Structure formats: structure tokens, C-alpha cells
Amino acid sequence: MTQASKTRLTVADHFDLAIRGEYAAQELYQGLMHLFRAHPDAVELWREFAVEETEHAQTLQGVLDALTLEQQTAPADMEMALAAQQALSVPVAQHLAGVKTLEDACELVSDLENSETNAVFEFLLTHFDADSQISPFVLAQLREHIARLQTFDERLGGRYQRLKIKAEP
């Protein structure tokens, strides 16, 4: 992207980037489900995350659809839009190629969920959701989604155990 095109991003473009990011995360979780298909607990956890990513994308699409044309064509917050763009810069297949163990998968997911992706999602909801009753509910769900990262040990075993579980390409 050139410097000139950076200045032309609109709020709608920003939402599009964020929605694509949510679907990319869903694709990542589906890839992890495949890599660890022999481990039902891991498959179930990745499935739960994949479903939630789809819900996040649908929520963002709903908020975007509710914006007026004037709001959609307004200039985007460039810092947040570039963060969304950065989150999409590494293809899902490249992320998955680096996953050799269940511990690698957990680290990747932790990095992803604590990255700019969720900051962008939260920013868009808090700044553009016309229905103020939706944002607090969805943001609470997002916090629960991230908090579930803390269940890796409980659901998938400790780090040492996860290092022994190999991905199956």
C-alpha cells in the first residue's frame, strides 16, 4: 500500500479489514482443528474459538450495515486501520506451518488473541455501534473469549504435556 492510499482508508475499509481479520482467525482455528484432529479436547476448544470468530465478524458486519453512508465514507482512524491491516499481513497457512506441537498452537493462539486484532474489534464497537446495548454485551463476550486462553492448562494439559503432542499435517 502506498502512502497516498493509506490516507484514503474509510471507516468502511477499516470494518472490512477487521471483518477479514475475524474470518482469518476462524480459518486459523479450523486449521488447528485439522492439525490436532486426533485430540478431541483440542478440536473442541479450537471449534469454540472458530465459532466465536464467525460471530465477531457478523457483529462487525451488523454494525457496519447500521452506519450511515456519511459515517461509512468518513476517514478511518489510521493507526487502528493499519493495525487491522498488519494483523492480516501474514497468511494463515504461514502461521499454521510453524505449528509443530500443541504448545506451539497455544502460543500462536495466545499471541493472536492478545494482538491488535481484538483491540481493533473493541475500538470499532465502542466508536461506531449505534445500539449502545450491543457493545457492552459483545465486549463482555470478547473478554470471556480472551479469558478462555487461561484454560489451556486445564483443558489441554500443562506446557510439558502440550510439547509432546505433535501436529498431524
Image (cartoon, rainbow, N blue to C red):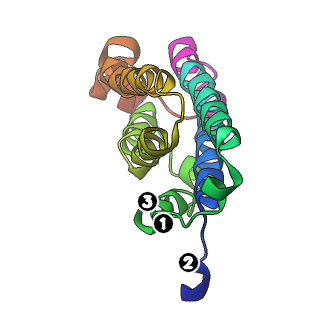
At 64% from the left and 60% from the top, the residue drawn is: 13
Asked whether the residues under the numbered discs 1 and 3 touch, taking CB atoms below 8 Å apart as contact, a structural biologist would say yes
Q: Earlier in the sequence, mark 2 or mark 1?
A: 2
**122 in magenta:** no
Q: Are marks 2 and 1 in contact (CB under 8 Å)?
A: yes
Up-down: is 52 above or below 72? above
Is residue 156 in view? yes
Q: Which residues are magenta?
A: 34-45
* Residue marked by disc 1: 82
Q: Which residue is mark 2?
A: 6
Decide which of 51, 100 is in the foreground and name it. Answer: 51
Q: Position of residue 71 (x, y in %)?
A: 60, 54
Q: Which residue is mark 3?
A: 80
Whether residue 143 sits left or right of residue 72 in the image: it is: left
The image position of residue 98, as x and y in percent, is: 51, 51
Within-10-Å neighbours for mark 1: few <14, some 14–19, many 20+? some
- Label whose residue precedes the other's in the sequence (3 or 2): 2
Disc 2 crowd, CA 10 A, few/some/many (<14, 14-19, 20+): few
Is residue 149 rendered to the left or right of residue 21? left
Dot 2: element: helix
Residue 144: mark in rendering: none
* Quadrant, the N terminus: bottom right
Query: Given the image, on which type of amino acid does mark 3 rest?
Result: Met
Q: Disc 3 on helix, strand or loop?
A: helix
